[in-house]
Amino acid sequence: MAGERKSLLKRIEWLLFKLEEGLLLLALGVLVGLSFFQVLLFNLSQVGFTWAGDWSLSMVWGDRFLRHLVIVIAFLGATLATREGRHLNIDAMTRLFPARVKVIIKAVIDLISSVVCLLLAKATWDMIAILRDSSGEAFKLGSFVVADWVFCYAIFSGFTLIAVRFVIRGGQDFWGGWTGNVEPEPPPVGAVAPVQPQ
């Protein structure tokens, strides 16, 4: 039963990872593609292609959209960093404890971090409710108007996904520490593996 639960959790985590990775690649592709297209139109309009200048003027929404897209990419990157355990982490004190205790401490810290992220997500949700009544438009695509507060959902979703990541990591760490099945810690980023004597 515990093995089935663990494999289901692993499957859910893998699906979440693939979704985040796909969204990140899509957002990066749109960011690079739209930026390149805007620069190309601007340069073509400077050398005398008037149609490029007209297109460039019709894409005034592009800059604001790209600014908001950067926030989306930042939060997707943060969720992936949390998954990999490469988020901001101060672990000077935990190095003093044995592996089993260290893992349980990490689990508690991850669960506290998830609560903080959920509180930030709740604050963002409240901010969205306030902005809906007072916010202006971010940009127009023909007759389609996108309001500023719509992009706040990226912040809400980002904090929620990070909280889910912390819960998954904390649960895995707590279970590993409780059962004594502690996985070895990966080396720090950029660390060089020690040379084995021959």
Image: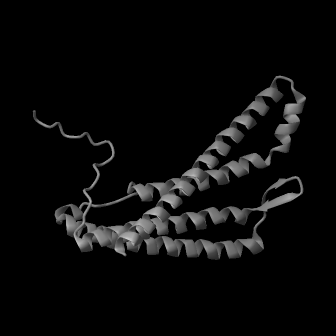
**Residue 119 placement (x, y as % from top left):** 51, 75
- Count of numbered circles on the image: 0
Quarter containing the N terminus: bottom left
Question: In front: 75, or 176?
Answer: 176
Q: How has the structure been colored for display?
A: one colour
> 167 left or right of 122?
left
Residue at horizontal 89%, vertical 32%?
51
> 102 left or right of 173?
left
Residue 63 visible to an observer of this rendering: yes
> 197 left or right of 68?
left
**Residue 62 placement (x, y as % from top left):** 75, 46
> Which residue is at the far left?
198
Above or below, 116 against 74 in this view is below
Residue at horizontal 36%, vertical 70%?
3
> Which residue is at the far top?
47
Question: In front: 52, or 5?
Answer: 5
Quarter containing the C terminus: top left
Above or below, 124 against 148 in this view is below
Q: Which quarter of the figure has residue 105?
A: bottom left
Residue 93 visible to an observer of this rendering: no
Above or below, 96 against 27 in this view is below
Above or below, 166 against 84 in this view is below
**Residue 148 placement (x, y as % from top left):** 73, 62
**Residue 56 placement (x, y as % from top left):** 82, 38
